[in-house]
Image: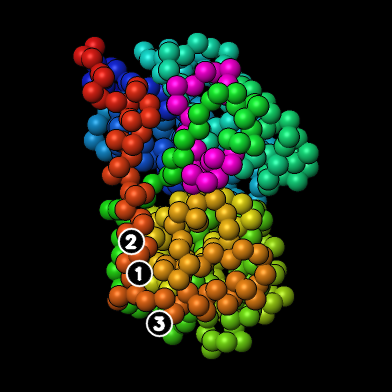
């Protein structure tokens, strides 16, 4: 952060990006990962309003920051990340985030642009109280975030929240609505909600991966460094340790694989409120030597583990668009997945993995065994690499500008 710069050092932003996560911090999920990718693609064409993970960014006003050497406007709404990532916050983060945006939006609007982007449904009702020249919204996932909340006591509000979310979205008259979901799931969502959506168009728009971080290697060096050489098969799951990720299915499959292979290994990369439940279930299944929980890791450390693994697993009950699985594809991994959003466009049975249509641990374990037989070259599946090309962040700028004119440089005029 360089607050000594004159305000003239930064160009006028084209749009405000409101993010529930800190793009300068460590990505803890798809929304923050997408915010990072947006800044990679458009830099200081965005001004960013978000929380900050560090204490040296002033709260409640626009300041001139830095994004990879370029000046960029950022507005720190305050930090609300829990210190203990293994527990759900006492007050849901969505509630805190909405309250902070409501508090600071008059100040946020003092910057010289009335174009805005967000992917947080909880703030739509706040945003619609103001006039905007252009608005782009992105569903971070098409699952109802309250119906599938980590707070069971709030799930009864799911239907009300869903209706309010879509009503507020329509009232905002967005220029573009994107969805981090595959085309099939997006079409189904539109059909199921056509009355609420009216004539609003929703376009499939998956989160991307960074090819400078996630790329294929044969994994031998990574296995040696991580001490995984004696294990087989080596399986990996990445994401929040939450019930919605269906971790029980992966654990039960490993208990079955233990009877087939002498030393299977499953690594969880992530943390969350269900960690203690997972650890308890690991003990019940007597697979302490086969399962390892590593917590949240920097992207390059995640890549090392992906490279070392034989298969990537998706055992989720629901998904938006799995960023982690796209990163696994970019590393040339084979996948075994439950039938959730995104897998129909990333997994082809027998080519780079298998999709399991039910939550049967025996079927999931068998799919893992079958996927291990799929051909690789030096540990890399070429079919996965080919699929991953569509989801590289190098295409984000052109793909997004095509769907939101505000970001189309061809339409920009000198100010």
Label 1–label 2 contact, CB within 8 A: yes
Corner quadrant of residue 279: bottom right
Q: Judge whether 229 appears above or below 319 on screen.
A: below
State the CA–CA distance, disc 1 to disc 2: 7 Å
State the CA–CA distance, disc 1 to disc 3: 20 Å
Residue closer to the observer: 82 or 380: 380
Corner quadrant of residue 289: bottom right
Corner quadrant of residue 228: bottom left
On the image, numbered disc 2 is attached to which residue? 385
Which percent across, then down, holds residue 20?
Answer: 51, 34
Q: Residues within 10 Å of mark 3 (few under 14, many from 20)?
A: some
Badge 3 element: loop
User: Looking at the image, is mark 2 or mark 3 earlier in the sequence?
Assistant: 3
Badge 2 element: helix
Residue occupying the point 45% across, 63% down:
348
366 displayed left or right of 51:
right
Which percent across, then down, holds residue 318?
Answer: 61, 51
Q: Which residues are magenta?
A: 169-189
Residue 24 on the magenta span: no
Residue 294: image tag: none
State the CA–CA distance, disc 2 to disc 3: 24 Å
User: Looking at the image, is mark 1 or mark 3 earlier in the sequence?
Assistant: 3
Q: Which quadrant holds the C terminus?
A: top left
Badge 1 element: loop
On the image, numbered disc 1 is attached to which residue? 381
289 displayed left or right of 27:
right
On the image, numbered disc 3 is attached to which residue? 229
């Amino acid at each position: 952060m360089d607050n000594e710069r004159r305000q003239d050092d930064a160009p006028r932003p084209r749009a405000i990006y409101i993010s529930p996560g800190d793009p300068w911090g460590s990505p803890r999920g798809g929304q923050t990962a997408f915010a990072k990718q947006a800044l990679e693609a458009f830099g200081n064409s965005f001004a960013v309003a978000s929380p900050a993970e560090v204490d040296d960014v002033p709260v409640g006003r626009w300041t001139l920051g830095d994004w990879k050497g370029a000046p960029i406007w950022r507005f720190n709404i305050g930090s609300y990340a829990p210190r203990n990532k293994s527990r759900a916050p006492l007050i849901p983060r969505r509630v805190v985030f909405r309250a902070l945006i409501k508090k600071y939006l008059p100040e946020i609007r003092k910057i010289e642009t009335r174009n805005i982007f967000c992917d947080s449904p909880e703030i739509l009702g706040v945003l619609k109280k103001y006039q905007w020249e252009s608005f782009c919204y992105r569903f971070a996932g098409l699952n109802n975030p309250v119906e599938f909340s980590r707070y069971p006591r709030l799930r009864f509000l799911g239907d009300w929240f869903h209706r309010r979310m879509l009503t507020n979205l329509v009232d905002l008259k967005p220029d573009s609505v994107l969805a981090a979901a595959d085309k099939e799931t997006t079409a189904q969502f539109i059909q199921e909600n056509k009355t609420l959506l009216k004539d609003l168009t929703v376009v499939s728009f998956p989160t991307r991966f960074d090819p400078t971080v996630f790329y294929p290697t044969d994994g031998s060096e990574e296995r040696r460094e991580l001490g995984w050489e004696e294990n087989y098969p080596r399986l990996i799951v990445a994401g929040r340790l939450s019930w919605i990720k269906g971790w029980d299915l992966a654990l039960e499959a490993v208990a079955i694989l233990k009877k087939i292979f002498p030393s299977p290994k499953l690594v969880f990369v992530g943390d969350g409120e269900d960690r203690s439940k997972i650890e308890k279930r690991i003990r019940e299944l007597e697979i302490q030597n086969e399962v390892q929980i590593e917590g949240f890791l920097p992207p390059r450390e995640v890549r090392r583990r992906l490279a070392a693994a034989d298969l990537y697993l998706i055992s989720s009950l629901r998904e938006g668009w799995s960023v982690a699985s796209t990163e696994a594809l970019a590393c040339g991994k084979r996948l075994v997945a439950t039938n959730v959003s995104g897998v129909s466009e990333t997994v082809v049975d027998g080519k780079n993995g298998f999709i399991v249509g039910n939550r049967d641990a025996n079927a999931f374990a068998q799919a893992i065994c079958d996927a291990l037989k799929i051909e690789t070259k030096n540990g890399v599946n070429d079919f996965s690499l080919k699929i991953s090309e569509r989801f590289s962040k190098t295409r984000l700028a052109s793909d997004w500008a095509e769907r939101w004119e505000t970001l189309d440089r061809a339409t920009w005029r000198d100010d």
